[in-house]
Image (spheres, grey):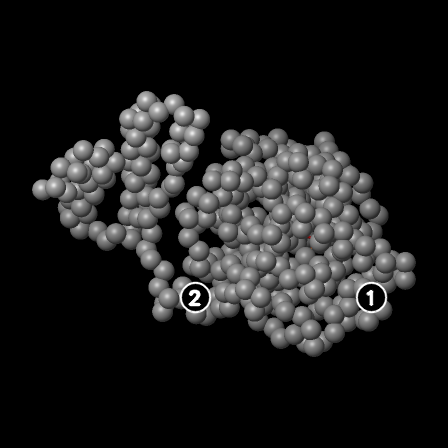
Amino acid sequence: MRIFSKTLSNPRRLLFCLCAGLLLSWFTLKGTGLHANLDLLCQLHRILSTEADLLSQHNSTGTNSHLSHLKDVKLPRILYTKSDVFNPQRTDVLTVTPWLAPIVWHGTFNRHILNTQFHQIDVRVGLTVFAIKKYTRFLNTFIESAEKFFMVGHKVNYYVFTDRVNEIPNFTFAKGRRLVVLEVPAYERWQDVTMRRMEMIRDFSIKRFVKEVDYLACVDVDMVFLDEVGVEILSNVFGALHPGFFEKSRNEFTYERRPQSSAYIPVELGDFYFAGGYFGGVIEEVIKLTNYCHNAMMADKQQNIEALWQDESYLNRYFLSHKPTKILSPEYIWNNYYGSPAVVKTKRFLGIDKIYDEVRF
Ligand code: 5GW
Ligand code: MN
């Protein structure tokens, strides 16, 4: 009885009881499990929490201390099934590195929790792509699919580096998202087109990105988003497992093996083989990474040597001595050339088949 009257006198509890009662009868009627209706439950709970907060604010308007706003700090309450220490979500793949960086696979994270965390800091994400020469043709699919699947609900700046400014189509963007066209030179050799991305990302990060975004993701443009790529990718510094090498052993990695090159990695070293077309992190870390890679390339150029897989080789060398704080599974940079292995549950970001004669020069 005491509990009952206490409940009635507290608007937050009253609301919660009403909500719980409603839900209970609803579940009984429908006869469905809790799991399938978790989202609805979360939504209801959030609405009611906000109403309860408003009520308690209303009740405390008498206190006009300059600290009174501190009482109303909103703590989002999210409902989800408890993690089970004896039931790992994935047992078929490695989900953490020896230096305790997560490896992000489908099924290992709760997007709802992560979105709440990143909304709390109002995260701003930059996505850089290069569309040099004929590669402007990939932009339409890239941007349109990114609007459907990349960081949905968050602030995004697309940074498009191009030499063909007037070939950039018009797009419509969701709220808080925009495209920034950055005019840059087109290098003669295709190797330089891909390698010089490091220098340009570094320079624009220092000049501009640091003021506009918190994180940067730097990716290839000849790609399409087919499933969600969200805040689960964000970390201090991240890379992605190359789809062609995640099952391979060290000696099969196509690292640069000539000791004269600054991208050299001896056969007894190396953790993973990372894809050149996907890296990122906080701006400061992206500056360190791109600066290292660019300087290593320039040092090699002085000696007339160029690493086997251009920027990808230098990136792999960087990650050997600066371990990424998060690693994306090949779901995040798949290519159907590698088929559809069982461990790849979803192809989030897929390479587009190129007719090489049409795009190469
Ligand atoms: C053109 C011919 C050969 C190699 C690269 C290019 C090229 C690359 C180009 O003409 N224009 C251009 O913007 N790029 C940028 O470099 C694109 O963002 C592209 O996604 C990235 C890497 O080159 P890819 O995608 O041809 O490399 P792979 O390894 O994915 O085939
Ligand atoms: Mn590519």
Question: Is 209 located above or below residue 99 in the figure?
Answer: above
Return the residue at label 1: 261
Packing grade of label 2 (10 A; few <14, some 14-19, many >=20) is few
Name the quadrant containing residue 127.
top right
Q: Is mark 2 within 8 Å of ligand 2?
A: no
Q: Amino acid at mark 2?
A: Arg
Q: Amino acid at mark 1?
A: Ser
Question: Is 54 located above or below residue 327 in the figure?
Answer: above
Return the residue at label 2: 90
Residue 29 locus on image (x, y percent): 15, 46
Residue drawn at (62%, 31%) of the image: 170
In this picture, residue 27 sits left or right of residue 137: left
Residue drawn at (71%, 60%) of the image: 318
Mark 2 → mark 1, Cα distance in angstroms:
38 Å
Q: Is mark 1 within 8 Å of ligand 1?
A: no
Residue 335 locus on image (x, y percent): 58, 58
Question: Is 269 located above or below residue 40 in the figure?
Answer: below
Residue 221 locus on image (x, y percent): 65, 47
The answer to the question of whether label 2 and label 1 lie on touching residues, with beta carbons closer than 8 A, is no
Residue drawn at (59%, 33%) of the image: 178
Q: Secondary structure at mark 2?
A: loop
